[in-house]
C-alpha cells in the first residue's frame, strides 16, 4: 500500500471557525448591500437612516447615529447624499443653531414605503420562523461577540 504523502490539513481551531463564519457573514452582507445599490440606488446605511426616521420621526444627528450604529461623522456624509436626492431635510433649531433636526421629506416617506427589507428576504423569512427562544439565543450570542470585538478595538486604540 503506497504511503499517503498528501499534506495534512489540521482542523480549524474554535477561534478560526468563528472568524471564518464572521468573514462569510460579512461577505453575504456586502453582496446584499451591492444588490441594494443596484436595485434601489441606496446603500444599506442610507436605508437604515431612512427606516430610522420613518420609525422614530424627526431626530437629531446624535440620535440617528446611535439608532443606526454609525459615527456622527459617517452619518453626516450619508445625510448629505440623502438630502441631495431630496429624501431628507435638515432644519436648524431657532433656539440653538448648533442643533439640527433631520426629517423625511414627502419623497423620502414615499421611498421608505417601497423599499425592501434591509436583510435578504429569504434570510429575514427564515429568521422570522425561528422559535422565540432560538431568536433570543442568537441575539445574545451576537451581542456577546459584538461586545468582545468592541473591547478588542478599544484595547488596540482603535
Image (tube, helix red, strand yellow):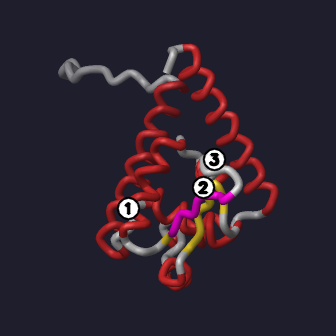
In the displayed structure, 38 sits above or below 73; it is: below
Q: Which mark is residue 62?
A: 3
Distance, label 2 to label 1, CA atoms, is: 16 Å
Position of residue 11 measured from the top left corner of the image (x, y, whole percent): 43, 25
Crowd tier of the residue under label 1, counting other residues whose Cα lies within 10 Å: few below 14, some 14–19, many 20 or above: some
Residue depicted at x 33% and y 66%? 37
The extreme right residue here reads 133
N-terminal-most mark, 3 or 2: 3
Which one is in front, 113 or 107? Answer: 107
Residue depicted at x 54% and y 45%? 70
Q: Is residue 123 magenta?
A: no
For label 1, the SS is helix
Q: According to the image, label 1 marks what residue? A: 81
N-terminal-most mark, 2 or 1: 1
Report whether 109 appears left or right of 74: right
Q: Is residue 93 magenta?
A: yes
Q: According to the image, label 2 marks what residue? A: 100
Amino acid at each position: 500500500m503506497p504511503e499517503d504523502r498528501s499534506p495534512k490539513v489540521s482542523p480549524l481551531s474554535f477561534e478560526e471557525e468563528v472568524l471564518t463564519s464572521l468573514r462569510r457573514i460579512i461577505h453575504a452582507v456586502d453582496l446584499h448591500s451591492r444588490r441594494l445599490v443596484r436595485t434601489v440606488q441606496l446603500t444599506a446605511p442610507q436605508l437604515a437612516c431612512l427606516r430610522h426616521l420613518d420609525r422614530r420621526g424627526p431626530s437629531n444627528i446624535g440620535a440617528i447615529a446611535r439608532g443606526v450604529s454609525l459615527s456622527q461623522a459617517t452619518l453626516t456624509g450619508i445625510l448629505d447624499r440623502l438630502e441631495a436626492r431630496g429624501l431628507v431635510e435638515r432644519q436648524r433649531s431657532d433656539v440653538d443653531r448648533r442643533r439640527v433636526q433631520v426629517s423625511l421629506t414627502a419623497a423620502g416617506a414615499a421611498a421608505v414605503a417601497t423599499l425592501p427589507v434591509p436583510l435578504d428576504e429569504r434570510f429575514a423569512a427564515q429568521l422570522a420562523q425561528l422559535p422565540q427562544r432560538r431568536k433570543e439565543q442568537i441575539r445574545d450570542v451576537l451581542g456577546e461577540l459584538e461586545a468582545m470585538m468592541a473591547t478588542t478595538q478599544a484595547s488596540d486604540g482603535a
